[in-house]
Amino acid sequence: MYYIRRTNLDDAQAIVPLWRSFLEARSQADPSMQLKANFNLEKYVEKQLKTPNSYGFVAENQQAIIGFLFTYIYDETLPPELSATTEMWDTPLKPRRVGSVLGLYVLEEHRNPKLIKELIDAAIAQAEALKVSDIDVLISMEQTGIHSLLEKAGFTKSAIQYTRHYNINNDDLPPLNLATSESIKVQMPSPGMIPLRDPKTQQNVLNPQGEQVFLLPVKDQSGNLLKTSSGLPVYSTPLRDPETQDWVFDELGKLVVCPVLLDEAGNIIEYQGIPIFCPPLYQRSGDKLILKQDSEGNYLFAEVEHNKDGTIKRSPDGKPMFKYD
């Protein structure tokens, strides 16, 4: 007898040998998946158990955990209010909310279609509860039994993946760019954090201290999240240098963002459903256009214009008007 349940941190040590067996089997079947020597798999499993939007399920009998299935659910694109105003996120494809399978393994002596199907059904139920649009599963060619189970569960074959493996010396790899250097530590974002990327290379952006930069949802003075009229969180637009188009950092290495425009009550001002941000001020330096700063080095932004009655002045089409002098 066995039963299926969600994982918890106490399961880490029991899952480690199962995950190791899973990785070894995948590595034998696919030469492109080479395992690292002396990798701390226990910390890796603990990380999966702690990662937001990572969901684990185990099959357990009276003696021990005999199988597991881990999934990770993510959105392929940014929230609408950011992607609609930032050209670097343009893509011809519609965004998906994806359920991706990280690993599935059951001890050989306990493998049977019913147990594996129940693990799969538990993961599907979790994905459906989070309104995923697609579930992606990568299965090796020789796992014909899993192919059959997935097809019975409503999955279809959508692609064939070919690989060609090269035995290379990792000590002699030519660098591609700074973002792939081994000296850079890439953070896993917390919920609500969006990695900032270079619009030219689509690589992660680092601040002057070499740390990965994230966009954060805007909060009010009380620490509460500001939201649009449709209930979506708001992300400020990062400031860009008018000459180089690079992201701008202040003297402390902090990303400079345009402040969101608020009314007297502290509510976000929108135009056609999109939050309005205060634009930066510019000035001429010789033949170059540069961002305007005050005597202390703070970047300056335009103030909104007001009517005599204190209301915000708007253009004929209803867009707020700013003072640029």
Image (spheres, rainbow, N blue to C red):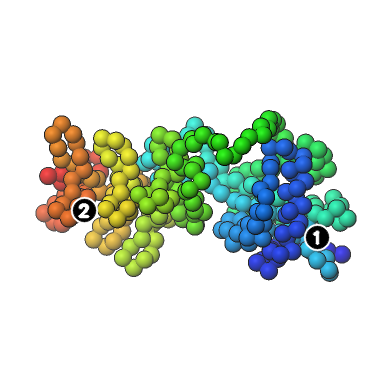
Which residue sits at x=36%, y=66%? 223
Amino acid type, callout 2? Asn
Residue 182 seen in the current view: yes
**How packed is label 1: few (under 14 Cα within 10 Å), some, or many (20 or more)?**
many
Determine whether 151 is above or below 220 in the image: above
Which residue sits at x=40%, y=37%? 199
Q: Position of residue 189 (x, y in %)?
A: 49, 54
Q: Position of residue 96 (x, y in %)?
A: 56, 42
Q: Position of residue 194 (x, y in %)?
A: 45, 50
Residue 270 seen in the current view: no
**Of residues 8 and 20, the one drawn nearer to the viewer in this rendering:** 20
Q: Is residue 173 left or right of residue 44?
A: left
Task: Identify the residue under disc 1.
Answer: 66
**Of residues 30 and 35, the one drawn nearer to the viewer in this rendering:** 35
Q: Secondary structure at mark 2?
A: loop
Q: Is residue 84 left or right of residue 135?
A: left
Task: Identify the residue under disc 2.
Answer: 298
Q: Position of residue 258 (x, y in %)?
A: 29, 49
Determine whether 53 is above or below 161 in the image: below
